[in-house]
Image (tube, rainbow, N blue to C red):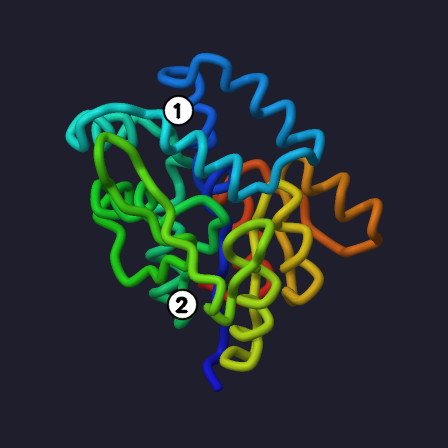
């Protein structure tokens, strides 16, 4: 069994802004109403994202340029390297899509990171999701079930740390050994009496892991 791994959500955790919100702002007239339906529980997460990502109507070159504008926590690249230098594996676990995540990892020259997310691909001026209902991590609501992923990783590692910011992250937090929470995830975990450490940046996470002896 391996010693430890750090698993992080992407949108709103590694990035400062969700990609879907950028698409709605730039390309999807009426997307705000759709978002209200989704937030009210009248749409599944995966149906909402599929509709938003299919509304871009841009050549792939333009989409990639837009992806490169997603703001991320500036400390993330060095934090990932620090985790790896100290014997930890780093995973990105996202209920979005690996399409834009992989482009950003390449842009920031981040290597040896496993991305576990909904498969995305470019076709006919839009991003589409390839969801496999037979996959062992399948979720009808999110496409990927984050709690299943973390439970599986727990069988491979002695310790799993997790970082997230929103409702989908409340489910894997139940199984993580230590959860770092941003934004609304803090209130969700408080309500469910799930322990967590509040965070606003990965610099804080690094300091806490150093204090606990996971990194030097």
Q: Does residue 118 appear left or right of residue 126 in this picture?
A: right
Nearest the viewer among 51 and 181 is: 51
Residue 22, image quadrant: top left
Q: Position of residue 75 (x, y in %)?
A: 40, 41
Q: Does residue 95 appear left or right of residue 177 in this picture?
A: left
N-term mark: 1 or 2: 1
Nearest the viewer among 76 and 215 is: 76
Q: Does residue 197 appear left or right of residue 95 in this picture?
A: right
Q: Position of residue 194 (x, y in %)?
A: 78, 56
Residue 70 is tagged as none
Q: Does residue 66 appear left or right of residue 118 in this picture?
A: left
The residue at the point 25 percent across, 57 percent down is 111
Label 1: element kind: helix
| Residue tagged 1 | 23
Question: Distance of mark 1 from mark 2, alpha carbons?
Answer: 31 Å
Residue 140, image quadrant: bottom right
Label 2: element kind: strand
Specify the farthest residue to the top. Answer: 29
Specify the farthest residue to the bottom. Answer: 1
| Residue tagged 2 | 89
Q: Nearer the viewer, mark 1 or mark 2?
A: 1
Residues at circles 1 and 2 in contact by the CB criterion of under 8 Å: no
Q: Is residue 199 above or below residue 207?
A: above
The residue at the point 42 percent across, 55 percent down is 131
Instruction: Give the quarter of the figure containing the C terminus.
Output: bottom left
């Amino acid at each position: 069994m391996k010693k430890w791994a750090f698993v992080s959500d992407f949108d709103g955790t590694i990035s400062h802004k969700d990609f879907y919100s950028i698409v709605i702002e730039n390309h999807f007239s009426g997307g705000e109403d759709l978002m209200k339906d989704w937030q009210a529980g009248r749409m599944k997460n995966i149906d909402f994202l599929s509709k938003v990502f299919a509304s871009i109507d841009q050549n792939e070159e333009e989409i990639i340029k837009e992806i490169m504008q997603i703001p991320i926590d500036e400390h993330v690249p060095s934090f990932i390297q620090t985790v790896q230098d100290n014997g930890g594996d780093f995973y990105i676990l996202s209920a979005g899509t690996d399409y834009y995540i992989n482009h950003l990892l390449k842009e920031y020259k981040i290597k040896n990171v496993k991305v576990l997310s909904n498969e995305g691909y470019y076709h006919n001026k839009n991003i589409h999701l390839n969801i496999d209902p037979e996959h062992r991590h399948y979720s009808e609501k999110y496409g990927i079930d984050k709690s299943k992923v973390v439970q599986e990783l727990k069988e491979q590692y002695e310790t799993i740390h997790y970082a997230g910011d929103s409702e989908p992250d409340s489910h894997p937090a139940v199984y993580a050994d230590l959860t770092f929470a941003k934004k609304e995830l803090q209130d969700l975990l408080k309500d469910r009496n799930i322990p967590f450490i509040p965070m606003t940046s990965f610099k804080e996470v690094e300091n806490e892991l150093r204090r606990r002896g996971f990194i030097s």
